[in-house]
Amino acid sequence: MSAAGHRLALAYFAAVEAGELPDSLLTADMTAWTTTQGTMGKAAYRYAIRLLAQLCSQPITFTVDAITAEDDRVVAEARSRAVLIDGSPYANTYVFALRIRDGRIAHIAEHFNALIVQEKLLPLLPLISGAS
């Protein structure tokens, strides 16, 4: 699982940078948990990733500092950088904990600095068409 887990985590980051999580990375019953939103289903999480992309004037980028994969678990430590639609910089630090089933992500927990999200991202949501 180690090499496959690393590849899956890197594919996840590439997908988030692209602004869309394809079904090929996720189980049908995938769930997520984030520091600011709590538990959500697959559709809500994919929507959150699309919203994040809309809040950025250019794609967000991730620097992965470490990945540890064992059995059905992958943990990644990462940092993000972006320029938001209001021209301000965005940066955050994360620990992502993934549960893997049949080579796909069955659950992901995103731990990050919630204060940065509240200060930088939430005020921009009214500027996004269809965000509520």
Image: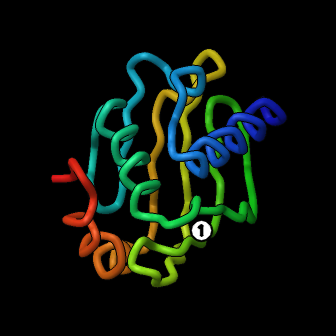
For the residue labelled by badge 1, is the local secondary structure a helix, a strand or a loop? Answer: strand
- Please state which of residues 55 and 70 is positioned toward the viewer in this rendering: 55
Q: Where residue 84 sits in the image (x, y, percent)?
A: 45, 73
Write down the residue under mark 1: 80
Q: Where residue 35 sits in the image (x, y, percent)?
A: 34, 61
Question: Compared with residue 12, is residue 56 higher up or lower down, i.e. above or below?
Answer: below
Residue 118 in the figure: left or right of residue 107: left
Q: Residue at x 50, y 77 (%)?
A: 90
Residue 46 in the figure: left or right of residue 41: right
Q: Residue at x 62, y 69 (%)?
A: 79
Q: Residue at x 53, y 75 (%)?
A: 83
Task: Determine crowd level at label 1: few under 14, some 14-19, many 20+ residues with C-alpha closer than 10 A.
Answer: some
In the picture, the quarter occupied by the N terminus is top right
Q: Residue at x 64, y 48 (%)?
A: 13
Task: Check the image and name the residue furthest to the left.
Answer: 132
Question: Compared with residue 52, is residue 32 higher up or lower down, i.e. above or below?
Answer: above
- Please state which of residues 94 and 18 is positioned toward the viewer in this rendering: 18
Amino acid marked by disc 1: Ser
